Every structure is written in structure tokens, then in C-alpha cells.
């Protein structure tokens, strides 16, 4: 009797193993479905990224405008410095002319 019981137990264990395999296959199928859902979500994220890129472009345009204004101001300062230098030279010449006379 004992031997028969042992054999039955072994068979049951084998059945259990088979069930385990079946369960694993089902789980894998479920995982695939999950992956598809994730892919759909990624597409949505990409749309958001596109919007962000557009915003960045707008920001960059604004930055460029600001930079241009700054450059113009710098140029004006340089011109002003040149004018000051010219005035100083003229003053020196005037002084020299007065001294020479």
C-alpha cells in the first residue's frame, strides 16, 4: 500500500508541476498586454514632449531677441567711448594750440 501511495503522490507532484507551467504561460501573456499599454502611454508622453519642445523654441526666440538688444547697447557704448576719446583728443589739441600760441 505504501508503494502505491508514494506513486500517487509522485503523480500528483507531476500534475502540480504541469499546472505551474500553464500558470507561467498565462502570466507571460498578461505581461505582453501590459507592455502594449505602456507603449500607448509612451506615445502620450511624446506628445507632451513635442509641446515642451515648441515652448522651448518660443523661449529661445525670446532669448535671441534679448541678446540682440544687449548687443546693440554694447555697440552704442563703444561708440560713446570713441566719442569721448575724440573729445579728449580735441581738448588736448586745443590746449596744445593755446600753449603754442
Image (cartoon, rainbow, N blue to C red):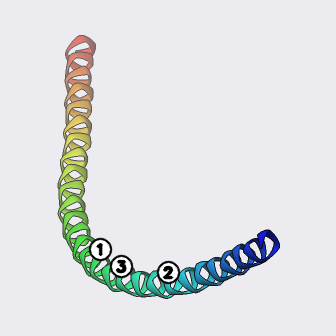
39 left or right, relative to 23: left
Q: Position of residue 82 (x, y in %)?
A: 26, 38
Q: In the structure shown, which secondary structural element does the residue marked by tag 1 occupy? A: helix
- Chain-order first, disc 2 or disc 1: 2
Q: Position of residue 36 (x, y in %)?
A: 41, 87
Q: In this view of the protein, which residue sits in the foreground, 3 or 62?
A: 3
Q: Position of residue 59 (x, y in %)?
A: 20, 64
- Chain-order first, disc 3 or disc 1: 3
Image height of 49 relative to 89, above or below: below
Quadrant for the N terminus in the image: bottom right
- Chain-order first, disc 3 or disc 2: 2
Q: In the figure, residue 16 lies in which quadrant?
A: bottom right
Residue, far front: 1
Q: In this view of the protein, which residue sits in the foreground, 58 or 41?
A: 41
The residue pinned by badge 2 equals 27
Question: Label 3: how many residues lie within 10 Å, few (<14), some (14-19) or many (20+)?
Answer: few
The residue pinned by badge 1 equals 49
Image height of 51 relative to 74, above or below: below
The residue at the point 20 percent across, 38 percent down is 83
Q: Spatial distance from mark 3 to mark 1, Cα to Cα? A: 10 Å
Q: In the figure, residue 25 lies in which quadrant?
A: bottom right
Q: Spatial distance from mark 3 to mark 2, Cα to Cα? A: 23 Å
The residue pinned by badge 3 equals 42
Q: Spatial distance from mark 2 to mark 1, Cα to Cα? A: 33 Å
Q: In this view of the protein, which residue sits in the foreground, 14 or 21?
A: 14
Question: Label 2: how many residues lie within 10 Å, few (<14), some (14-19) or many (20+)?
Answer: few
Q: In the figure, residue 80 lies in which quadrant?
A: top left
Quadrant for the C terminus in the image: top left
- From the image, state whether disc 2 or disc 1 is nearer to you: 2
- From the image, state whether disc 3 or disc 1 is nearer to you: 3
Q: In this view of the protein, which residue sits in the foreground, 4 or 28?
A: 4
20 left or right, relative to 73: right
Amino acid at each position: 500500500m505504501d508503494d502505491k501511495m508514494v506513486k500517487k503522490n509522485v503523480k500528483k507532484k507531476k500534475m502540480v508541476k504541469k499546472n505551474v507551467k500553464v500558470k507561467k504561460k498565462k502570466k507571460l501573456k498578461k505581461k505582453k498586454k501590459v507592455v502594449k499599454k505602456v507603449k500607448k502611454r509612451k506615445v502620450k508622453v511624446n506628445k507632451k514632449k513635442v509641446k515642451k519642445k515648441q515652448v522651448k523654441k518660443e523661449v529661445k526666440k525670446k532669448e535671441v531677441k534679448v541678446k540682440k538688444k544687449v548687443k546693440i547697447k554694447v555697440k552704442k557704448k563703444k561708440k560713446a567711448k570713441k566719442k569721448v576719446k575724440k573729445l579728449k583728443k580735441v581738448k588736448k589739441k586745443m590746449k596744445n594750440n593755446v600753449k603754442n600760441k
